[in-house]
Each structure stands twice: as C-alpha cells, then as structure tokens.
Image (spheres, rainbow, N blue to C red):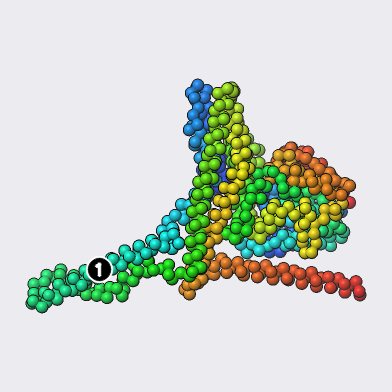
Amino acid sequence: MIEIPETRPGVCEFEIEIEDWLFKLAHFKSKPKHKIPVLICYAFINRPYILDLHEDVSVIKKMLEAKLDVWLIDWGYPKRADKYLQLSDYIDFIDRCVEYIRQKRGVDAVTLHGYCLGSTLSIIYTSMFPEKIKNLVLQAPPVDFYTTNTLAEWARNINPEKIARALGNATGDMLNLSFLLVDPIRLVVGKYQSLLDNMNNEKFLRNFFYMDHWIFDSPAVPGGIYVEYITRWYHRNEVINETFDYRGRTVNLNNIKMPTLILAAEKDHITPPESVLPFFEKIPSKDKKMILSEKGHIGLTVSSASQKKVWPEAIKWIVERSD
Amino acid sequence: MLQGLSSIFGKVPKESYELLGRNIEIRKTLEKIYRDYKAGIEINTRDFDLVFNEIFRYFFRPLELTIIGARPLTFILPTRKNISLFETFSNTFQAYDDFLKSLRDHFQLTFSIFEKEGYTTLLTDSIKEFRELVEKYGDLELYDFDRYKFVADYPYILTNRALKHISESFEAWERFGNDYFTFKNLMKRTYKKAVEEFINTAKTKEFGSYSEFANEFYNIAAKHFDELLRSEEYLKVQSSMNSNLMDHIYHFRRFAEEALENNPLNPFATVSQLDEAYKRITDLKRKISELEKKIEEISKDKVVQA
C-alpha cells in the first residue's frame, strides 16, 4: 500500500483586498517592518501558489520572515466568459493594484516582482509607469522571444487564432500536454522513474506530489490573451523590439533605470537565460544584478538548492532596497 | 511492482496516477531486457515496443479519440463527400416503399376476387386478420413511409451554411487523420533510431547496474527526441495537425449551432450566441472602468482646486 501525503498547497494566510470578477489582489498577513511593499505579478499560465507551495519551499514565507509587506496578483481560472480579455485588461489590473497599494501604504512606488509571463507584463508596465516602481524583480522572465528552445519554436509555428476560435480558451489540459511533449523522455519517463526509486522516501513523495498537484492544476488561458501573447510576443517579439503598445504608450526599455534583479535558471527549457540576456544588457539601470541558478524553470522556485542559495540572496537584495 | 496503486487514485492528479502506472510497466519491461542482456541474450528492437506505447499513449490518446469518435458521424452527416450516400438511401427507401405498396395492392386485389366469387366464407380466420391488417395500413404512405424518406431527405432541411460547415469539418478531419499518422510515424521512427543506437552502445559498453543501463537508454532517447521536436519536418506536421484539428472542431460546432439556431423548437442558446453576449459584457465592463477612472480624476482635481 502506498501512502501519499495529503496535498494542501498554501501556507501563508492572506486576505483578498480587490476582487474584480476573475482577477484578485491578495495581501499576506504579517507585521512588515520595511516600507516598500512587494507586489508579485504571477504568470497567467499555472497558479501562483507555487511560491507558497508548502512549508519547506515557501518563498512567500521567507519574504514575510524578512518583514516584507507582500501582495500578490492572482489571475484566476478563466472560463469561456473571459475569452475576450486582452493584455491591456491585465495591465489595467496591475495599475489598479499598484495604485491601491500606493494609497493604502502611503508610498510613491512599490517593488514589482514578475514571474515568468508575469515578468513580461511587469516589464511592459514598468517601462510605461517607471515612477510607480521602486525596484523591479524578474523571475524566469521571457523578454526576447526569439530563442531556440523547443517551446519557443513551437509557439512561433502555431496559429493561435484557430485554437481560440475552436476552443474559446487555450485549455489547461491542452497546454499541459504541450509542456510535457516538449521533453517527453525526461518529463514523462525520467521524472516518474525517479519517483519509483524513491517510493520509501517520505520527503521525496511529499515534494513530488505537491509539485504534480500544482503542475496539473492548470487554468485555461483566455482566447484573446492566448492570441495576443503568441502573436505579439512569440511571433513579433514586440517587447524586446519595443513596439508593444498599450493605451497610446509604447514599451521603452530606457525607462528601466530603477534597481533591477533578475533570477534566471540555466536549465530552464521554457524561458532560457538567453531570453533575458539582451534585456539585461539593454536596460540603463545602474543597479542591476542577475542571479543564475543551475536548476530549471520550476526548480528556480522550489528546489532545495534555490531555497538555500537563490532566495536568501534575492530577498536580501529586495530588503536592502525596501526602506 | 507496486501493490495497491489503485489506493492512491483520486488522491493524486489523474495524470500522475496514469503516468506512474505506465512507468511501472516501462520499468518491468526494461528490467526484463536488462536481465536478458546480463544473461548474454541479444537485445532486440522489438523488445522496446511496449516502452514506446507506454510513453506516447498519453499523447496519442486524445488525438486518436478524435479520429475514432468522429468516424461513425461521417456516415450520418451530409458532407459533400457522402451526399451521394443519401441519394442511395433515398433510392433504397423508394424501392422498399414501392415493394410494400405493390404487396398491399396484390393482397387487396386477391381478396376482392375471392369476395366476388363468393368464397368469403371459405376464408380462414387468419386470412381475415391479415386482410384487416392490410386495410388498416391502406394509407401507409401517409403515416409510415415518409418516416423513412425523411432519413434520406434531411440534408435539404439544413441551411446552406450548415452544409458548408459540416463538409469543411470532415475535410479538415480527414487531413487531421493523415497528419496524425505522419506525426505518429515520426515519433516511432525516432524512437526506433534511439533504440538501435542504444543496442549498439550496449554491445560495447559495460553496465554495472540496472540504473546505469536504463539511464543510458533514457539519455539516448531524449537526445533523439530533442532533435526531432525542433526539426523542420516535425514543426510542419505538428502545425498542420493542430490547424486541421482546430478547423474540424470549429466547423463541427458551427454546423451543430446552425442546425439548432434554425430549429424553432430549440430552447437553448448556442455557444456562439453566448460568446456574443460575453463580448458585449467585456466591452461594457471596460467602458465602466474608464468612466470610474475619469470620475476619480475629476474628483481629485476638484479637491486640489478647493
């Protein structure tokens, strides 16, 4: 009989401060000492609780222990009714959250922490409203989409309009299938063979099933968003080319002069470091730093190596710029 | 290998459960191959077939379901390709109709001759019953025959748009089927090459344990698939397969919607009609947000002026 530990992701308590149908702004309960709040802008693929998966690997918990004031945007589980959302709606919501936090905390600017595709949104927002961002933290950020990894090649070769027209939204199941097929031997075989080798290792089992719970809890991507991000980011590379526009403003990377921290992973098969290097070189910020983990896209957050090395260093960097 | 695997069903994601089960089978197969290898028995590429099926079944299943699930419908729905089938249905039903009518006429004539010649009393009870039955269905063409004709006639009830969508749906489905088999063949070919390379490696390399043996196989297979999945040939097939699958799904839905929207008895709103409502709601929501922002700005200005 195999004993599987119960998976209940989410360790830190929070309150929902804004709820706008699909989107939510969560505020983690704590007694912060540092003045500048941290707003985490997660990706619209997968769920943000990867940052608070369980006690041992919770990045949020580490931030709270460092006495930071942590807020998080949750893009929700889109339904068919959300298929007409556009990237501008997402940027509008980031602005709404930033404004809300600025007013509530009486600060001019916040630390914006983007994760994966949430980093891309964060870069767009920061380049357009630099006065509202004190520090920019980018985790596994795709900025230059003309990379040679398999997933990017696939994205450049698909027709997102047809998918949105047929399915309404890009479903979580469909996206999961693609993410696994990108590397079938390692992700479908190698990973589960390791599980078979560790069936008596309670800690391994716990980590494994918490991760799988998160991996297969995939929300759909609204049809309109799917079409826009595949076309404008993967096909046209509008962010690094500075042609992406939003309500009459255009991305200008020269505006990224604030302290900027980039967390990238060497073995990231989704957003390899090559996708952020041109951005890192291009921005004029004089206080910029890149921490390179030897892990992959998800290991950057939850691996024990990252928990011991990357996160203490990253949080220290944020804390030093939060007063 | 693992007793009681079913006890975790429902406790872990179904994907984890399935992949774990498949990996148990993969391990059993590779362990057997390793035992043979250690015993000096030559490894055969066929021994690895089960491993291929276990790895890729997860990916092939939804695609094969689309092919198998739609096949029966190709005989029922009036696509450009099988409209002649409906003409054949029509002719068959017409022939059956003609046969039943002539049979009825024959019996009516026979009974009238018997009656004329005064043989009515000689009719047995069963013949009487049969006559009543024939008379009861005297107007058979009014009540029953049209039911059969309808089967052959129904393409003409559908709108032109519905007929166009169903044809496009199944034309895309056929192209998707061809793409799928090319895709599957590419996967199989690549896997076979990987197995061959592994067998050649195993001939010259010593493996100290099952883990070393299996890891070498996984590394070689991963390398081959890394190359395949980025190749021009693969990208072309995957793109075409996706495109045709999505066209099939879209046109099939539009066909069903056309049929429903044009049926006055249909009490349901279609997905496209709901989409139109969702679009209007989303647009209105944006307008409300803009207005709220403007009101806020005006209020702030007033406070500053005061």
Task: Please rate how many residues cluster around mark 1, counting C-alpha atoms within 10 Å: few if below 14, some from 14 to 19, many from 20.
Answer: some
Which quadrant, please, contains the C terminus of chain B?
Answer: bottom right
| Residue B277 higher or lower than A191, as above or below | below
Q: How many marks?
A: 1
Q: Specify the subunit that label 1 lies on.
A: B
- Residue A203 x %, y %: 66, 38
- Residue A14 x %, y %: 74, 55
| Residue A24 higher or lower than A194, as above or below | below
- Residue A59 x %, y %: 75, 46
The residue closer to the viewer here, B111 or B181, is B181
User: Which residue is depicted at the point 63% across and 46% down?
Assistant: A179
User: Which residue is depicted at the point 18% across and 71% down?
Assistant: B107
User: Which residue is depicted at the point 8% across and 76% down?
Assistant: B117
The residue closer to the viewer here, B207 or A61, is B207
Mark 1 highlights which residue?
B100
| Residue B119 higher or lower than A189, as above or below | below
Label 1: element kind: helix
Left or right, B23 with respect to B156, comes to right
- Residue A25 x %, y %: 74, 59
The residue closer to the viewer here, B299 or A62, is B299
User: Which residue is depicted at the point 14% across and 76% down?
Assistant: B112
Q: Is residue B282 visible?
A: yes
Q: Is residue A70 visible?
A: no
Left or right, B86 with respect to A4, comes to left
Residue type for callout 1: Leu
Splitting the image into 4 quarters, where does residue A150 fall? top right
